[in-house]
Image: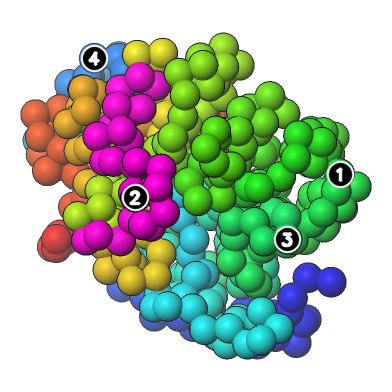
Amino acid sequence: MLPGSRTGMVAMAGVLVLRSTALSQANILPAPGTIVLVGGVLIDGTGRAPVENAVIVVEGGTIRAVGRKSLVPIPPDARVIDATGKWVLPGFIDLHVHLTYPTGMPQYSIEGTALISDTEAGLRALTFMNMFLRKGITAVRDVGGAVVPLQVLMRGASEGWINSTRLFAAGRVITTTGGHATLPFAREANGPWDFRLAVRENFKAGFRLIKLSPTYTREEAQAAVDEARTLGMRVTSHGGGLSDTWPKTTMTRIAVEAGVQCIEHLNEMDDDVLDLIASKGVHIVPTLAIYRERHQKRLVARELVERRGWTLSMHETLFRKARQRKIVMGIGTDAVGVSRGLYPGLYFTEMKYFVELGASPMEAIMAATQKGALILGEEARLGTIEPGKLADLQVVSGDPLKSLEALGLPELVMIGGQLHLFSSPQP
């Protein structure tokens, strides 16, 4: 059985409602039927040239029309927001978070049960979601966490009593006994049929994303991917690191050959594996900045550094090689434990790192928006400011194509047409 009880879920739900109201009441404005943003410079997330003096018409949470002011009529009953002198961008997407993980070093009982409550984990998750929203990050992809809090947060969003950043969650990570994952946030499975069962359990629990974590056999990975495909679920896998085999790394190759859509992190990857990823159209969430932070603080595992020869330059070289192969990459942070203090700025550190390694500011913005939605499997609804998409967007006061420092201090954030106004941005 999955952890948690119905009683615990109900109790935590009540606490989360109060918490969400307390955090958000001051800056959420009920959205009228039609909202129009007028006069801003539009960077729509597609990579097209910015549109000056743009008009964005939002009706019922959906973008209905976009274009130059001279070409887009403004409905007479609309609420008009003047964005003159500002820049309008899609909301950003963080593709690798663990919202419910403990902030400090996790404490576990001998049975592997976390000595934290679901309520604590849920409040922590909602606090981070609200923090991300405040910075223009309108969707997050949780790739492993406590089941009950994630269920409550997703239910709260669907029923309308939680108003925060969008949450896409994987539930429990699926790994083998002794594999790379942390109890109780993981489901240990052994053998192909048990991997299928673990996928079915996550589906039954309401999750539509699966994360695999090494080590696993080729048969186990293929069984999980096949089951997920049957159920319409996406699959990503942790790549490399301590959980991979040594001296020859094989887990990423197995995952890609099995048919996963995405690999998390860039670790010890041979050129032929990068070629395989490119040929199969698999995506990568490289999580560059957290590796650099851990490297600078000498927190990278000694096994990787001393025995396997891991270096930061190796990590950076892999990014450049992936970019040369035109592999789709998105922005993910992965700050857990003591690294939590890097939030929320770590997201923008990651974007700047992309630029340091050769990407243009526009490419970094696309990685945070259009490419992020593609990796989520939500490209039909999110990631760009185009007619028919959900109205997830932000307004900033500086030109991000000149400096990414302009990001992270939005004056307005919209999620599905719901306005969040910030009159005095703070770092």
Q: Amino acid at mark 4?
A: Ala
Residue 417 at x, y percent in the picture: 44, 47
Q: Which residues are magenta?
A: 297-323
Q: Which residue is mark 1?
A: 192
Q: Which residue is mark 4?
A: 49
Between disc 4 and disc 3, the foreground one is 3
Distance between mark 4 and mark 1 Cα atoms: 48 Å
Between disc 1 and disc 2, the foreground one is 2
Which part of the image, by quadrant, shows the C terminus? bottom left
Distance between mark 4 and mark 3 Cα atoms: 50 Å
Q: For residue 29, what is the image quadrant?
A: bottom left
- Front residue (pair 342, 26): 342
Report the residue at 82% width, 36% height from top: 219
As drawn, 264 above or below 165:
above
Distance between mark 3 and mark 1 Cα atoms: 13 Å
The mark nearer the N terminus, 4 or 2, is: 4
As drawn, 400 above or below 168:
above
The mark nearer the N terminus, 4 or 3, is: 4
Between disc 4 and disc 2, the foreground one is 2
Q: Amino acid at mark 3?
A: Thr
